[in-house]
Image: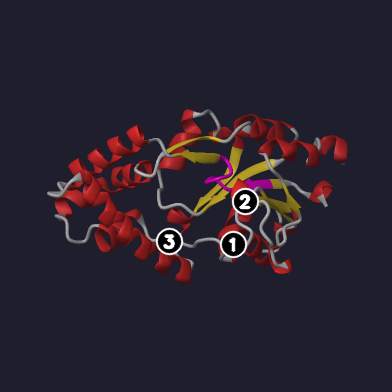
């Protein structure tokens, strides 16, 4: 199967980047959220309320396979009772700090090297990710010198649809100019990522699960084509396309 693959798409959260729940980092973000919103409660109480509202939003987003714009996320879901002059101009920074309040995100072990090597081997590289931010991922790719390696980057916050809706995968394949059957997706979720990838007609789906999920029982319909424990393993399965041809 892998010798027919022309494009490799990667998830971001728990795949290309991992979350470190560092309290100093989280505390700084909570204080910045308080400053940006002008909240009169403590930063901790503010974030507890934002987290509660975010859970309500996520339930809606999951049920509708839809991602709100950052403007709608903050003005309709997370902070509709805050002054609009405080919220509307700062939605991008609010989203960034809200995500930082969960922890610091760092590159997965070997992720950058694997992306560069797969690109060198002749694969079209892409990203498909459910994420509420529109700027953080492009900014990270630029800062890490990775933006030039990805031809297709589709974020649910920009596209408007969430995985597992097949349209987000099909849009990524369209931007990559590769037929879906010649694409592979590497994600971390046995249900969402497997179902969505197959509904879109991708040729292969690979799951790199969290440590806690590596021994769980997975129903047949959610079984991927391959399970890996690290991104470096991709180099064992996707040889140089020039040699493979």
Query: Which is nearer the eye, 226 or 216?
Result: 216
Vertical placement of residue 180 versus 137, above or below: below
Residue to which mark 3 is pinned: 67
Q: Determine the secondary structure under disc 2.
A: strand
Horizontal relation, residue 35 to residue 23: left or right: left
Residue to which mark 1 is pinned: 192
Q: How many marks?
A: 3
**How far apart are labels 1 and 3 at the CA level?**
15 Å
Q: Is residue 15 magenta?
A: yes
Horizontal relation, residue 207 to residue 171: left or right: right
Q: Residue furthest bottom?
A: 63
Horizontal relation, residue 83 to residue 152: left or right: left
First reached walking from the N terminus: tag 2 or tag 1? 2
> Do labels 2 and 1 touch, CB within 8 Å?
yes
Residue 64 in the image: state x and y as whole percent: 46, 71
Vertical placement of residue 42 versus 193, above or below: above
Query: Which is nearer the eye, 76 or 216?
Result: 216
Label 1, residues with CA under 10 Å away: few <14, some 14-19, many ≥20 = some
Label 2, residues with CA under 10 Å away: few <14, some 14-19, many ≥20 = many
Question: Does residue 119 appear anywhere in the picture?
Answer: yes
First reached walking from the N terminus: tag 1 or tag 3? 3
Residue to which mark 2 is pinned: 187
Q: Which residues are magenta?
A: 8-16
Mark 3, mark 2: which one is toward the viewer?
Answer: 2
Residue 10 in the image: state x and y as whole percent: 61, 46
Q: Residue furthest left?
A: 40
Mark 1, mark 3: which one is toward the viewer?
Answer: 1
């Amino acid at each position: 199967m892998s010798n027919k693959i022309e494009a490799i798409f990667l998830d971001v959260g728990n795949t290309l980047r991992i979350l470190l729940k560092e309290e100093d980092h989280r505390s700084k973000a909570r204080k910045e959220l308080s400053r940006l919103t002008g909240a009169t409660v403590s930063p901790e109480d503010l974030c507890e309320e934002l987290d509660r509202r975010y859970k309500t939003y996520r339930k809606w987003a999951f049920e509708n396979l839809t991602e709100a714009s950052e403007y709608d996320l903050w003005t309709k879901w997370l902070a509709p009772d805050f002054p609009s002059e405080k919220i509307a101009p700062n939605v991008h920074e609010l989203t960034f700090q809200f995500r930082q309040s969960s922890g610091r995100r760092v590159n997965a072990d070997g992720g950058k090297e694997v992306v560069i090597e797969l690109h060198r081997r002749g694969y079209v590289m892409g990203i498909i990710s459910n994420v509420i931010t529109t700027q953080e991922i492009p900014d990270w790719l630029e800062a890490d010198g990775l933006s030039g390696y990805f031809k297709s980057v589709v974020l649910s916050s920009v596209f408007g649809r969430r995985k597992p809706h097949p349209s987000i995968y099909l849009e990524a394949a369209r931007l990559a100019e590769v037929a879906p059957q010649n694409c592979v997706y590497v994600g971390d979720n046995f249900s969402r990522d497997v179902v969505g990838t197959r509904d879109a007609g991708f040729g292969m789906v690979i799951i790199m699960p969290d440590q806690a999920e590596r021994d769980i029982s997975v129903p047949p319909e959610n079984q991927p084509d391959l399970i890996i424990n690290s991104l470096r393993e991709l180099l064992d399965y996707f040889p140089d396309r020039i040699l493979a041809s």
